[in-house]
Amino acid sequence: MENLYSNILIVDDEKNTREGLQRFLEQRGYEVYIAPNAEEALMITKKERPDIALLDLRMPGMDGMDLLRKLRSEYPKMIILMLTAYGTVETAVQAMKAGAYYYLTKPVNLDELELILRKATREQALEHENQNLRQELMREKFEEGKLVGESPVIKKLIEMARQIAASAATVLIQGESGTGKELFAHMIHDHSPRKNKPFVTVHCAALTETLLSSELFGHERGAFTGATERKIGRFERADGGTLFLDEIGEISEETQVKLLRFLQEGEFERVGSSKTLKVDVRLICATNKNLKDEVAAGRFREDLYYRINVILLTVPPLRERREDIPLLANYYLHYFSKQNRKKITEITSAALEKFQRYDWPGNIRELRNIIERAVVLAKSDAIELQNIPDDLTGLIVPRQPDALVDLDDDSKLTTLEKSAIERVLKNVNGNKSLAAKELGISRRTLYRKLDEYEIADSK
C-alpha cells in the first residue's frame, strides 16, 4: 500500500502497545518511530518530522494532551490521533478542540485505525493539491509569468506546447538565458492532466553537487556533514506532477547517472539510504547550452541527452522576435505600474524605438528589469528616454550594422563575451550577483567565465 504521508510516530509508555502498533503499521508500508514518553517524542519529531502521530493520553511526565498542544503549535500540519484506555465523551471533546484528528480507545481496533489513517492521508493529499491550485491561481491573478507574444515563432511554440501537454513525454526546452523557458514549462504543466498536482522547479546551476543530489533525491539524517534531519527531495515533492530542471547542462556526471536511472526505471534512493523509492513524475528540462556540443566534448552523457530530448522546444532570443518587443514592454509597463501603484499608461515612441534597436543580450529578463526600473523612476504618466538613467543607458548599446561579426570566428565571439562581462561588472560596481542577473546567467557560470577570461574584480 502506498502512502503519500507515510511516517508515523507512536508515543505510549506501554511497550507492548507501541511495539504491537509498530509491527502492524510497518507491515502496511508505513515508516514508524516509537517513543515511551513526550520528551523522546519531541526529540524524534524535531529530527524526523513525522507526518502522523499516535499519542497515548496518560503518560508519566508530560501527558498526551499537553504533548498534543505542543505538537499542534510547532507542527500545525501534523495529523494527530489520541489513544487512551479511559475514553470518555469529555476527554474526546477536549482532545478534538485541542486539534486532534481522531480519538481511539484501547485496545485499538486495528481495522478502524487503518481506515482512519487512509482517510487522513487522503485529506492531507487533497489539501496539498488545493494549496498548489491556490498558488497557481495567485500566479495567474497577478499576471506575472504570462506568455506574451504575437510573432509567428512564438504562436507556433505555444501551439506545440499545448499539443504535447497531454502526453507524458519528457521535454527539453533550449534557448538563451532570459528567453522564457520556464514559462513554457509552466504552460505544458498547466495544460496537462497533471495541472492540479505539484509543479516543482530546481535551478541546477545554483547548487553544488552534494546539495543538488540532496535537493533532487532527498537525504537521510547523517548522510553527510550538516544533514541533521531527513529531507524529502524534489522528486518526491513532485509525485504525480511535473519536475522542471533548469540549466540541466550544468549537472555533474554522478547526477547525470542518477537522473538516467530514474528515466529508465522510474526509481531512485535518497542520499544515505538503500531504500528504493518510486514516483510518478513528468520531467521537463531546460538549457541555455548546446547539449550536442556538450555530448561531443564528453561533458554530458549521450544516453541521457536522448532520454531528455524526446520532444524539443527551441525558444528564440528576443532579437529574433522584435515584433514582440512593444507587446512585452507594454505588458510589463502595466504590470509594474499596478505593482507600484503608479498610473503610467504608455511608453513614448522614442523610447520604444530605442528598445527596438537594442539586441537584448539578457532577453526578456533584461527587458523586464529595465521596464521595472523605468516605472519606479518615472515622474509622469509615460516612460520617456529621460526615464532611463545613465547606468541603464550604458547597458543599451544600439546595433552597429556595419560592424559585422563572423559567427564562425571563435576568437571574435570570445572577445565580445569578455567585453560584455567587463562592461556589466563595471556598471554594477563589481557586484557579481547583480552582474549575473543582468547577463542572464547563474553566479556559478559567471565565476567560471571570470576565471576563463582572467577578468579581475571590478570594484
Image (tube, rainbow, N blue to C red):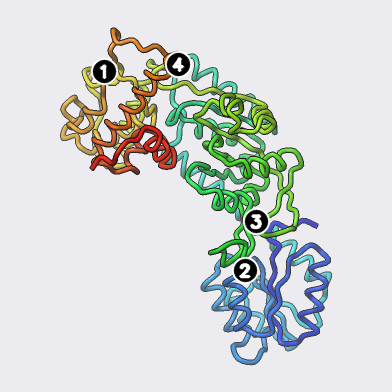
Of labels 4 and 2, the one closer to you = 2
Which mark's residue is nearer the viewer, 3 or 1?
3
Question: Residue 147: x percent and y percent?
Answer: 47, 28
Point out residue 354 in the picture as x, y percentages from the top left corner: 25, 19
- Which of disc 4 and disc 1 is earlier in sequence? 4
Numbered circle sitting on residue 151: 4
Disc number at residue 271? 3
How many circles with numbers are drawn on the protein? 4
- Res. 421 image quadrant: top left
- Amino acid type at mark 3: Val
Q: How many residues crowd around disc 3 within 10 Å: few (fewer than 14), some, or many (20 or more)?
A: many
Between the residue at mark 3 and the residue at mark 1, the CA separation in whole angstroms equals 50 Å
Q: Nearer the viewer, residue 87 or 254?
A: 254
Q: Which mark is residue 48?
A: 2
**Residue situated in front as seen by the camera: 446 or 347:** 446
Q: Secondary structure at mark 1?
A: loop
Q: Amino acid at mark 1?
A: Pro
Q: Separation of disc 1 and disc 4 at Cα? A: 22 Å
Q: Residue at x 65, y 70 (%)?
A: 101
In primary-sequence order, the first of circles 1 and 2 is 2
Label 4 and label 3: CA atoms lie apart by 46 Å
